[in-house]
Image: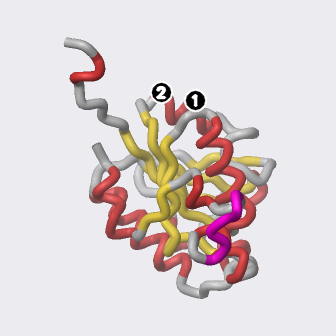
Amino acid sequence: MILADQEVKTRTAFLALDFATYIVENFSHDAAVAEQASNAMALARAAGLPVFHVLHEAMRDQIHPLLAPVGDEPVLGKSTLGAFATTNLHELLRASGVGRIIIAGVATSGTVLSTARWAYDVGYEVAVCADACADPDPQVHSALLDESVFPESWIGLWRIAGVVKPTEITDLRP
């Protein structure tokens, strides 16, 4: 059987980025983002997706209570904006057979943008759960996630990622 005849299945993981209480409370235009991200994470867990938490190293013990890890979910500490450069996230994802990621996080213009672009550049399929992301500036958040805001721009995450609602998470699992 040749590869073109096989249905290739890609394992999906859910990434919760910078959901430290301080960050959620001070760098989010949406007061409900933690609740929305928690709901998205619950759907990911129910679908059997692995969940990875990535926060700034100094805030690893300050995860927002609504997004607390369950069981042996990894909590990685980073020292840069993105989730990959200063963690072993890439190695953990590859070892788990993950080729697609769903991103939720604060801030859209910071960790979400940086992580999505890095992941896309190294070959991951990327989805951003828009309702589970927030930014200090709601206009920047919209510009990054809503194609209609700047349809000719290359800055939009919609150019490199699927922009999904939490209810679409189960559609992304293999």
**Residue 106 marker:** none
Give coordinates of residue 23: x percent, y percent: 72, 72
Give coordinates of residue 5: x percent, y percent: 22, 22
Q: Which residue is mark 1?
A: 91
**Callout 2, which amino acid?**
Ala
Q: Residue at x 55, y 34 (%)?
A: 123
Q: Residue at x 60, y 38 (%)?
A: 89
Q: What kind of element bears circle 1? A: helix
Q: Using a 10 Å C-alpha cutoff, classify the residue at mark 1 as few (fewer than 14 neighbours), some (14 to 19) or many (20 or more).
A: few
Give coordinates of residue 153: x percent, y percent: 70, 63
On the question of residue 106 being in view, the answer is no
Give the residues in magenta: 149-154
Q: Using a 10 Å C-alpha cutoff, classify the residue at mark 2 as few (fewer than 14 neighbours), some (14 to 19) or many (20 or more).
A: few
Name the side, left or right, on which 56 lies relative to 15.
right
Q: How is the image coloured?
A: secondary structure
Which quarter of the figure has residue 164? Answer: bottom left
Q: Which residue is mark 2?
A: 95
On the question of residue 32 being in view, the answer is yes
Q: Verify CB contact (< 8 Å) between mark 2 and mark 1.
A: yes
**Callout 1, which amino acid?**
Glu
Name the side, left or right, on which 69 lies relative to 167.
right
Indicate yes or no whether the magenta region holds residue 151: yes
Q: What kind of element bears circle 2? A: helix
